[in-house]
Image (cartoon, rainbow, N blue to C red):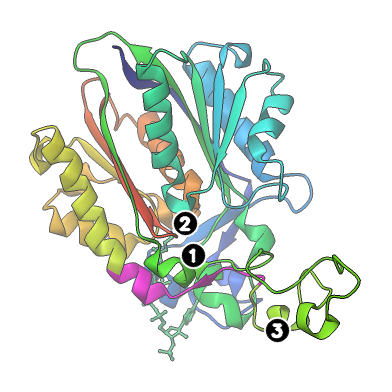
Amino acid sequence: MPNSRIAGVGYYVPKNVFTNNDLLKYMDTSDEWIQERSGIKERRYADRLGETTTTMGVEAAKIAIERAGITPQDIDFIIFATLSPDYYFPGCGVLLQRAMKMKEIGALDIRNQCSGFVYALSIADQYIKSGMYKNILIVGSEKHSFGLDFSTRGRNIAVIFGDGAGAVVVQPTEKEGQGILSTHLHSDGESAEILAMYNPGTHANHWVQKPVADFDDAEMGNLFMSKDMVEKAQNFPNMDGPAVFKKAVIKFPEVVMEALEKNKLSTTDISLLIPHQANLRIAQFVQQQLKLSDEQVFNNIDKYGNTTAASIPIALAEAWEQGKVKEGDLVCLAAFGSGFTWGSALMRW
Ligand code: UT7
């Protein structure tokens, strides 16, 4: 059975830079507050009309595919992770397949928010190991800027998210000891609503139109999104930041240790930990808990904010470009986010 390895990495971020001070135009916040609480200095926002989650994903994919030494026509499976798709349905996978003129291959969209990339990598790993596919493209891409509440009401969320895309190509490797050593996925839906966007969604007692004539209007309503939902900001993401923070600082170290223990390795063996870029303070806390040096942890949240499913592949591609990920290195990816879902992947590069 072959191992799977990441054979090519790429990322794309929009050219529009929004500094913390740029946000002062829209909401009551400050550069000092944002930097102190999150470590973020600036983020990128996609063009409002020209760029979508898919178009950014395509740009990242082009680079990853070229670096893997193949062409888009060689890709035999797509996994697209995002929480901000171009359409409610179909997903971005087929839009990318069309845009890149790929063969009639399978395209899987997954919705695991901040853990999306680690979940995608785990799926790709199994397909490669089983021999089913040889060149899997994983894309994590987000256009958060289209749906954030930029008023003071939404400031706790709006300031931390940014747009961008990252991609990798996963291939089999016969090289002894190389590739993905293990992946570890978890979830706990108990707190699903504390980091969520509720609407539009089928939980709501609303219909686009009355399904049958004798339904009581007062009970069923006839709107997809009611005035009440909009007034309560339920059409925007909702987050209890401190509660997410508290859980994240427990689950990140736990899932990194799980990966290390599974492979009989220790924290000193880690060449580079790439945590999901949720908040610099979370990454620093995790670093401290695991007693890792600055050289062992990669962060770039200061430049891009939290790009959810895109954050790990963007960071991985950037670290690789900076020569911080080299052949033989032990690389650990770890994520935690909405759901809650969390996970890790340990690989020998
Ligand atoms: O990737 C997905 C997973 N998400 C995360 O991991 C996020 C985890 N949580 C966090 O990163 C942090 O909770 C935040 C950065 C979101 C917020 O930091 P915090 O230290 O937890 O702040 P807080 O929410 O407890 O708010 C503290 C104060 C509040 O004011 P009062 O009630 O103390 O008067 C907020 O209203 O800061 C206020 N506040 C702001 N002030 C200026 C909230 N957002 C802002 C803002 N600018 N943007």
The residue that disc 1 covers is 160
Give the amino acid type for the residue marked by disc 2 in the picture.
Asn
Q: Nearer the viewer, mark 3 or mark 1?
A: 3
* Figure quarter occupied by ligand 1: bottom left
- Please say whether residue 243 is one of the residues in the magenta stretch: yes
* Extreme residue in the front direction: 214
The residue at which mark 2 appears reads as 306
Front position in the image: 196 or 58:
196
One can see residue 335 in this view: no
State which quadrant residue 233 falls in. bottom right
Which residue does the image show at 16% across and 46% down from the upper left?
Answer: 257
Q: Which mark is residue 231?
A: 3
Q: Nearest to the eye among marks 2 and 3: give it.
A: 3
State yes or no: Cβ of the residue under disc 1 lies below 8 Å from any atom of ligand 1.
yes
Which residue: 11% across, 40% down? 261
Give neighbour class at mark 2: few <14, some 14-19, many 20+ (Cα, 10 Å): many
**Residue 307, image x and y in percent?**
50, 52
The magenta segment: 235-246
